[in-house]
Amino acid sequence: MKTNRLKAKSRRILAALLILSALVTSSCWDRREIEELGIVIGMSVDHARQKQQTSEEEKQFVHRHKKLLPISITYQIVNPKIIGGSTRGNPTNQKPYINITSSGDTAFQIVRETSTRIGRPPFFMHLKIIILGEEVSRKVDLTQLLNFNLRDTEMRRTVYLTIADGKGKEVLETSPKNEDLPSFELLSLINNLAKTIHIAQPISIGTVSEHLSADTSFCVPRVVIHQKEMKLAGAAIVSGKTGKMLGWIGEEETAGINLIQGTGKSEEGHKGGIIEAVIKGSSEPFSFEIGKIHSKIIPSVKNGQLSFKVSIKMEGRLGEDWYLNEDAFKEDYLQKVNAAVKKRIEEIVTNTLKKTQKEYRVDVAGFGKQLHIHNPKEWKKRKENWDEEFSRIPVSLDVTVKTEEFALKGKKR
Amino acid sequence: MKPFTKSHPSDLVPVLSDNLQHILNLLGNSSDIVFKEMSLGRTERKAVAIYAKGMVDQQFLLNQVFGVISRSFLTEVEENPLPYSEHLKDFTRNASTLGDVSQVTRADQCVSEILAGNTCVLFDDYNSAIVFGTAKDNSRQQEEPASEALVRGPRIGFVEEVSENTAILRRRLKDPHLTFESLFLGRRARKEVVICYLRDVAKPDLVNEVRQRIQKIDIDDPIESGYVENYIQDNPFSPFPQVQNTERPDRVEGALLEGRVAILIEGTPFALIVPVTFPMLMQSPEDYYDRWIPASLIRLLRTLALFFALFLPALYVALVSYHQGLIPTKLAISIAGTREGVPFPTIVEALFMEITIELLREAGLRLPKPVGQAVGIVGGLVIGQSAVEAGIVSPIMVIVVALTAISSFAFPQYPAAIAIRLLRFAMMLAASIFGLYGIILVFVLITSHMVRLHSFGINYAAPYVPTRMYSWKDLFLRLPLQTLLKNRPAMFKPIDRRRSDHPK
Amino acid sequence: MSSLPISPFSPIQLTITTVSTIIGVAILTLPRVLAEEVGTPDVWIDVLLAGIIVAITSMICLHLSNRFPGETFYIYNRHIVGKVLGALISVLYIVNYITFGAFEARVQAEVVRHFLLDETPLEITILAFLLVGLYLVAGGLNAIIRINQFYFPITLLIVFTILFLNWKNFEFDNVRPFLENGPTALVPGIFPTAQAFSGFDVILFLAAYTRNAKKSALPLLLGIGLVTLIYMTIVVMVIGSLTLNEVATLTWPTMEFVKQIEFPGAFFEHFEIFFITVWLLNMFTTFFINLYLASLGIHLLLGWNIKLVMFMLLPVIYGIALFPKDLNATLELGKSIGFVSVLMSTTIPLSLLLLARVRNLPKRDYSLKEGPRT
């Protein structure tokens, strides 16, 4: 009886072994080794120049698609031979990355087209940053442009988005300073929001998609290229309705939007930076280092008239002072500093609102969302054409500044 | 052939030469058996002492046995003219002061006494033999067991003598309820097997089950405790050990107090403990000797070691050849860089290194200690280094394999480590076919097997599953003894639940 | 008639099994379903309401089972409605469990295709899932109960860790305003949410083998409360970090939610690996009980060897799992199964309970000493 059971069991084990061996010997569908992949860290999307159709076949292909604007995508692929592993130190003077550009009508097609020209096809799970060219973002809806990046299972929603002033490809061709790859360099620049409020809050394609699906407008950090060097400055404004870029705002207007939005709780959202102002009665500037920004947008309806109040509460420290008669040990001097910073902030924010409300006619700082939360009925009436409505709504400011300290030195003598 | 059955008449007859011939037939012509003839005083009668050379205490034999026999017959026969047979009986009675003396009436009994190291004396015209307990105490010095070394704890281990082992236990646990039950096992070897338990603690069903399973064993010689283990385990096809073995009396002592049953087997210092569950195999007696905070941390460390030993190479294979996106970017780049130029897929690389490590371990184990160390160093350093330099494996693979090997050495009990080693290869193969999904499938299979497996009626994953939250204080952590030692673990269903008096 | 022995288990084990059976596919899709059906950020109230309804229904199931101690639903339904109708109801449940098991196998394969193995054919992943599942189920009900207990703490640990790690992506503004369209707007969301709880009716079948089944009410309510809490937290967190409009566009919103946890430079940069593992383990636990109860039903109905029934059901389940031709068809199948399941688990126990009361059943004397009857 027992031996029978043993026999039955051993037969079962034999069967399991057979199945296992069948599986081992059969092909393993998804296996590809890590070194066979082209790990893409950054990519840029640009408008492709209409290329001359060389062959009849290609002409036909183009005519099949009615779209007039082909795009060209540049992938920045790591060359692990140079920066990874034991051969570190770059003996061959090769670049640690490979940039490869392909054009086509859809992103997926371009990915596959790339495989005809590079042995290790692009692999996107490590994609960190996407740079859009100015032209393409003005002409094409971002919903379509980023569709592949949001849909493909190899992609992540946490990829950051920037828009280049010029061609996106040029950003990938700059020479990096600290990092090995221009993409990594840009990535660390983006996260420097804690040092300066003159760059826009980093935005991931997931957040972009959230904005686009809710039809709200938003800002995307702008990258400027100057003599093979990149710089983050200002932001691009993208309309939530059309998904297309409307135009640029400068560094100061970007600061204004950052001030209206306040400090977020996430690490990337932590804002710091410097506000330069001049004390009343002096001609010399001082620097005020931002500590915390608490901002609130409060909608109110009076007599059917909608208005917003932006309340900004800022704390910080007096970081540098060129005014020779300063005396930070006196409380009323600090009050003067507060007043000067307050005036400066009001200036910045007013300019920003003027630019966005009057010039671009969009709401990029989340006024609509606050209206939705606080007054859903009012929001329902206006949400269809919110950006246009917003440009007519008065916004008042309520700024309070508090200098918490002035560090190690407080007066000249 | 069955030497110990009544297949032929073996009663002793009152003819010395017949008896001698009979015993000689049974024993065969073995060179270690000594037949020593002596004359009884001045009578014509003779006696023959039979014993196995080397097994008897020579000093005792000469001084006591031979001395007493010759003396008593020298003087007393002449002075007391009792009939010869009466005199012999009288002698036997008196001789009992010498210690272990008895009479046997059958030749096969004589043979087994001789083989046990006792001396058999046959007399002329007498139909029984007198057996002197001359067996030499051959037990070696009690040393600290090499296989289960502790930093803190008693420096004592079991020896090969079962009587010595029961004495060790008795000395440590002077409880009148400590019970030893002897059984004899092996058609040929007749080895003594002792079941020991605390009568008022261990569940009677458990003791009966152990006794029955041991009695069912039909084997000619249980050479080592492993033979018994193989016959009494629940599922011979399981990769997991379902019986615990140990050389440490303190471990057995602890087990007895929990209501478990230990089995001591003659001829091996390894005692068996049943039932055992997998979480128990991850524990060391030292956990209880240390203070509870370090002990708890060490337990957590072992849990980590278990995770590494089981999953690490498989995870590496799955991540590097299937889910590269789940590796942190910079690490991914550096793995890709180190794998640049390695000609094999990761699974081949991993199998190559794992098998090398297993070979090294095996080789180091079998060689004498100094040579073994040299093999370890040569193998570990030289093969690792040159395999990387030759570009056959990547340096990260070497780290992974080394970490895995170290983790599996961190297991306090060897059998558990072997089981995990085996399963690690299954994991790796699954990972090479299905990636992470394969690992999950094998994990589900292993856990399924674990919850289906029992050791003497106790679920193999207890006390993790079936969940008894109050037993968890002695699972991943080891909380202070004051809280642990209130009650015995409920999973063994002991008769006496309480270990100490405490207000209920 | 050969059956696997069942030894009685505790009310807590019953609860853990019920919870493990409930948690399954829905955890990945519930936020999208709610965003589509209701479309306001306060849909978590729907989860709460559905949880309360399910808690009440589960009490009805328990109460009904307790009227027939030691007998499983497949047996006692014939005492109430007679042999033919009882068999019909049993068949209904068997079919429900078979299709539910097939759906589980299919959905896990779809998710595995999306997040783990892109090219591996569905046929292979489904087959592997079924075979691995069969090994445990062949070990009987107690093995299933124990494995649920095995995975339960792991599940709780990972799910709550993931929710905690996502805290920095959560924006409270995204789940406001509260009740903007009034409470009536939430009503259409209750039924789809109740589908997320489908599987709680295993109580009907398992209460028979529970020690102190009468004391199961409190643990069960706590268990369903726990599921409600998990679902609510997930819905709130997913909508709070991905926004309502976005959630409605995503196939597996909870996966996207988990994928956005990022700790650059840490040893684990991403955490979806843990979540996928735990989710798959929960798919297994749901599948185990489905396969077991389907086999038990056939075994009790026809008297076939239960292990044989399990083996025979496997190809059937495999066939049904491969039947939907694409993802939409699969999700559609899930919807209809959920619909039928919710309908069955609310109406059948209630009407049977009422009928039993009216007919003043049971008339026979059931003593607990007899132990479970299978």
Image (cartoon, coloured by chain):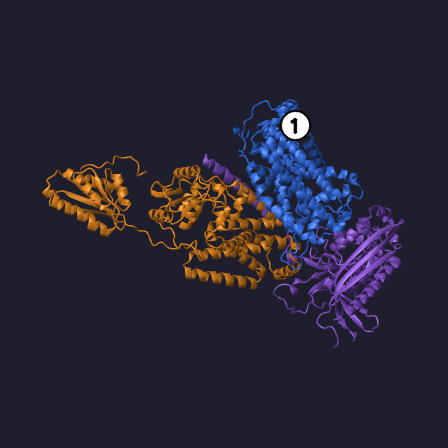
The colour assigned to chain B within the rendered structure: orange
Q: Which chain is blue?
A: C
Residue B257 location (% of width, % of height): 43, 45
Q: Can residue B198 be seen in the rendering of this structure?
A: yes
Disc 1 secondary structure class: helix
In the rendered view, does A17 fall on the left or right side of C19?
left
Tell me the quarter of the picture where residue C344 sits.
Answer: top right
Total number of numbered labels? 1
Q: Which quadrant would the N terminus of chain A be assigned to in this image? A: top left
Towards the viewer: C301 or A312: A312
Residue A159, relative to residue C26: is it above or below?
A: below
Q: Which chain is purple?
A: A
Residue B260, relative to residue C308: is it above or below?
A: below
Towards the viewer: B351 or B189: B189
Tell me the quarter of the picture where residue B229 sits.
Answer: top left
What kind of residue is marked 1? Leu
Residue B405 location (% of width, % of height): 52, 56
Q: Can residue A26 be seen in the rendering of this structure?
A: no
Q: Which residue is mark 1?
A: C353
For disc 1, the chain is C
Towards the viewer: C60 or B420: C60
* Crowd class of label 1 (few under 14; some 14 to 19; many from 20; radius 10 Å): many
Residue B293 location (% of width, % of height): 52, 55
Residue A225 location (% of width, % of height): 79, 66
In the rendered view, does B474 fall on the left or right side of C287?
left
